[in-house]
């Protein structure tokens, strides 16, 4: 079974983390191949010719690209593999889960990148935006244990990888996420208690070092 | 099943057109409420407090936002008629991928063309490249969805109403570079469900001329 499923991966990518978490939640075996993004493999270029990006899930030789599309695919192909489905079955609840996952992509990723990646006014503006966005997510979470309600779900999978950015965001942005969004931080701790999450996410400090390396490389150009 | 269906709309928005196409394909009756985007009303702000944008579908009093999510919702609630997404998970993932590709590229590139800035030439080149990529994906199929209109068709078709605007403001021809894609547009427009849901490109161009300032064109 394992040889049917390959993940083209990159340890520090929050998008790849989403897929690792989904696969782990479902207890699915797969082969993980770490890509060198500065020297992309011919397999990656063949399997994702449009974006040449990870993650790519290769199932029985056929590629699925784009992290949220991959997570949904996993949820559908292996529905029996877990007591819970990541996506709700009701169309309205599903639409809501997708809306908030999309919010993470539209808001958290771009502003987060500028908080650890930029400086000066750009960084300040991004920091304000990021705090607003995190608060908005906290509002959506409300008193639920997870965004999915009682169960860990699609929006949780979409967002939790960005927890690995917290140290970098706080250090570069000089602010405290727990002060601004205590409920959201409580949610991150709750998620980290799940093995699927804790085993799929790298250490925050290591991610910080990696992101700073990226930032230096970018600034050097 | 049907309940009350309301669409918060703006007639020239390709995103709103996606919702209208899906509703039209499925023969669903709905109330269209045109919104003033320069002076957003309480209904819109209440229905989409996060992004404050159209389209918003309000079904039985609950709002669904983001055009592709709306189209998926419509497809699932009215699943018994004209399915837009394939049921097979792999084929579905491919349809979602290509709709997402449209989402990531077409609107932004188009805007960089009609909002005439220094990078217009680059935007034109990239737009043509994207449309050619989509043309390759279409291949010899009648529609992206195969024999019938599907999710990717719904995602992309609205932008065809803006082609004349891109071409005229950018001084280039999409027909020349992507004849098969233009043929696909014409094929789709022959369907009453499509021609009812989409405005004529000339109307979009007239709108563009009238509202150049509000749209950010110098």
Image: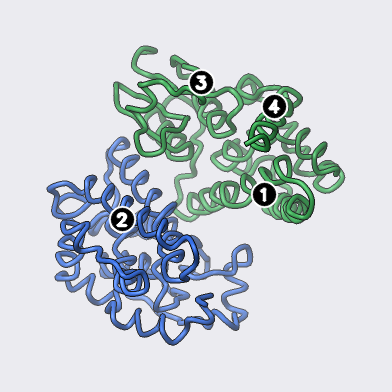
Give the residue at x 44% y 87%: B210
Q: Which chain is green?
A: A
Label 2: how many Cα within 10 Å (few below 14, some 14–19, many 20+):
some
* Mark 3 to mark 2 CA distance (whole Å): 30 Å
Q: What residue did someone put label 4 on?
A: A207
Give the residue at x 54% y 69%: B53
Identify the colour of chain B in the image: blue
- Percent of width and height locating residue B167: 31, 70
Q: How is the image coloured?
A: by chain
C-beta proximity under 8 Å, tags 4 and 1: no
- Identify which residue, A70 or A205, lies in the foreground: A205
Dots 4 and 1 on the same chain: yes
- Percent of width and height locating residue A145: 70, 40
User: The residue marked by circle 2 belongs to what chain?
Assistant: B
Q: What residue did someone put label 2 on?
A: B128
User: The residue marked by circle 1 belongs to what chain?
Assistant: A
Dots 2 and 4 on the same chain: no
User: The residue marked by circle 3 belongs to what chain?
Assistant: A
Q: What residue did someone put label 1 on?
A: A111
Asked if residue B94 is positioned above or below residue B125 in the image, the reply reads: above
């Amino acid at each position: 079974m394992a040889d049917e499923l390959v993940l083209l991966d990159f340890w520090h990518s929050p998008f790849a983390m989403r897929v690792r978490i989904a696969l782990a939640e479902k207890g699915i075996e797969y082969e993980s191949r770490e890509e060198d993004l500065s020297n992309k493999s011919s397999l990656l270029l063949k399997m994702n010719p449009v974006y040449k990006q990870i993650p790519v899930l290769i199932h029985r030789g056929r590629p699925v690209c784009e992290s949220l599309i991959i997570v949904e695919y996993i949820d559908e192909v292996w529905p029996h593999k877990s007591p819970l489905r990541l996506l709700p079955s009701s169309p309205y609840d599903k639409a809501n889960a997708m809306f908030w996952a999309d919010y993470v992509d539209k808001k958290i990723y771009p502003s987060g990148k500028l908080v650890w990646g930029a400086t000066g006014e750009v960084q300040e503006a991004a920091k304000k935006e990021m705090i607003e966005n995190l608060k908005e997510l906290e509002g959506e979470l409300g008193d639920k244990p997870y965004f999915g309600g009682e169960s860990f779900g699609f929006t949780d999978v979409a967002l939790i990888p960005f927890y690995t950015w917290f140290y970098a965001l706080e250090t570069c942005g000089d602010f405290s996420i727990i002060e601004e969004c205590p409920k959201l931080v409580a949610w991150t701790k709750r998620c980290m208690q799940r093995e699927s999450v804790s085993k799929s996410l790298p250490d925050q400090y290591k991610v910080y070092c990696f992101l700073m390396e990226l930032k230096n490389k970018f600034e050097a150009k | 099943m049907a309940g009350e269906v309301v669409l918060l709309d703006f007639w020239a928005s390709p995103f709103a057109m996606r919702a209208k196409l899906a509703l039209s394909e499925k023969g669903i009756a709905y109330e269209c409420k045109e919104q003033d985007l320069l002076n957003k009303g309480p209904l819109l702000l209440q229905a989409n407090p996060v992004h404050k944008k159209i389209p918003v579908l309000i079904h039985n009093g609950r709002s669904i936002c983001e055009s592709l999510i709306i189209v998926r919702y419509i497809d699932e609630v009215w699943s018994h008629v004209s399915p837009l997404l394939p049921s097979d998970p792999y084929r579905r993932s491919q349809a979602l991928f290509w709709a997402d590709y449209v989402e990531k590229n077409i609107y932004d590139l188009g805007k960089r063309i009609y909002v005439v800035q220094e990078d217009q030439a680059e935007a034109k080149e990239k737009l043509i490249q994207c449309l050619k990529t989509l043309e390759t994906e279409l291949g010899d199929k009648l529609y992206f969805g195969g024999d019938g209109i599907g999710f990717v068709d719904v995602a992309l078709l609205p932008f065809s109403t803006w082609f004349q605007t891109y071409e005229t403001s950018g001084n280039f021809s999409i027909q020349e570079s992507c004849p098969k894609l233009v043929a696909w547009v014409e094929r789709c427009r022959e369907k009453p469900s499509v021609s009812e849901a989409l405005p004529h490109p000339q109307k979009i161009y007239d709108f563009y001329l009238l509202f150049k300032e509000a749209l950010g064109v110098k």
